Amino acid sequence: MLAKDNQQQPNTNPLGTEPILHLIGRYAIPTSLTLMVNYLYNIVDQIFVGQGVGIAGMAATNVAFPMTILAIALALLLGDGCAANVSLFLGRKDQETAERIVSHTMTLLVLFGFGIAVLSFFFAPQIVRLFGATETAFRDSLVYLRTIAFGLPFLMFSSALTAMIRADGTPQYTMKCMMVGCAINLVLDPVFIFLCHWGVFGAGFATVLGQAVTGIGCFWYWKKPKTVRVRKAALRPTRALTLRILSLGIPSLCTQLLTALVQITMNNFMSRYGAQTVYGGDIALSVYGMMMKVYQIAHSMFVGVSSATQPIHGYNFGAKQYDRVRQTYGWAVKIGLTISVAWFLVYQFGGRWIAALFVSDEPLYLDCAAYVFRIYMAAFFLYGLHMVTASFLQGIGKPQKALCIPVVRQAVVLIPAAFLLSARFGMDGALWAAPMADVVVFLVAAALAIGEFRSWKKQGLGAEV
């Protein structure tokens, strides 16, 4: 696993030579499938809990879900920060620094993973109350969170190492690991819930076992990496390289942290204001959580495209092939907006059908799902632009600009608007905050991208987008 020499890698890299659309497909498809499988852990739990435990059990898994998002946030801080740096340094033909960065990241990943597991287990009661648990869902929320705490380090390993393995040029490997883990979860969920009658504990336990297999598989990859190796001498992190990893990973971290904060905020609003509607607090909370888990499937496609283009952006920017960077961004925008429109149609017309996969015999639940989907996703056809733009800015080493995008969407618009509108219009007001945020961040992302390419033109680095 640990290299003892410093073998030089070939100077040619497909990121700088292969057709761009081919590269995007090669990296995006396995990455998207990998993430989809990862998110399926939570969706499968939700479906089996909905069928085997009921709406209160679904509410419990929804309450614990932000902790999963937080774990992924820390993983992406390290994984995406590592991957972006590795791509930049490989583009500059600096093999040694690229390998030191990978080695640093491995140590940080172990420390962060076990830290969040300990925090989740011992502070579970405070966490589930903060995350919006109702009185009827509190006990199940506590059991579920403490169970999945044991799988959070493995979830972080697989999430971070996915980006690092992708930067190493083997995106298909993690897809295989994820599929094995998901298959284990799919088989064990019904066994533990229906045959063993373990309820939400059984769902969580099945998830942990699947995540453990996936995480260990991703670690195993580094025995024989493709281009960069883990070096024993570089396992002890230095301040300079650690800060460099974290600086380029901050946009990914903030995006996920703000996503978790939105989920926590909306959980509380659904519990409070949903109780004032015909649906009730538990149904509103369950529906919102179910919707956000389904949304993660769409989100995985955007992340797949963004993650696929990030190493292309980074390598070619480092190699001063600016026209390839511009062309890559153009393709990413087209693909991202196409995905956005497709999912917008699904959300507008398929909310009731999607909800029936989880709970099929509760008319109020199905009505609430169709209603919530239509409002919350009303501007989703614009969603793709800000995702690919943030990845582009992060890939070329401008994390501050990339960070503006999730901050504007979540912290500046969505959360404040949800507070203001819910105070006046209740649950409806909270839901309408999301499409407002999507419109604003679309305009911000477009302005940032246009400004960046115009500055390139002035410097003679590339044409306008």
Image: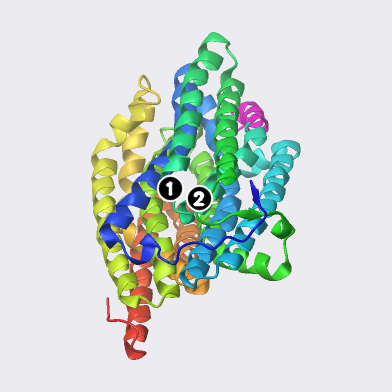
Please name the residue that numbered disc 2 is placed on: 165
Q: Assess whether residue 144 is covered by the magenta stretch.
A: yes
Q: Tell me the chief SS of the magenta region.
A: helix
| Image position, residue 375 (x, y; %) | 33, 48
Neighbours of disc 1 within 10 Å: few (<14), some (14-19), many (20+):
many
Give the camera-side residue of 382 and 435: 382
Residue at 46% in and 23% down: 186
**Callout 2 touching callout 1 (CB < 8 Å):** yes
Q: Which quadrant of the figure has residue 446?
A: bottom left
User: What is the magenta range?
Assistant: 134-147
Could you tell me if residue 276 is visible in this image? Answer: no
Residue at 50% in and 35% down: 281
Please name the residue that numbered disc 1 is placed on: 171
Relative placement, left or right, of 334 versus 317 is: left
Q: Secondary structure at mark 2?
A: helix
Q: Secondary structure at mark 1?
A: helix
Residue at 57% in and 31% down: 213
Q: Which quadrant of the figure has residue 361?
A: top left
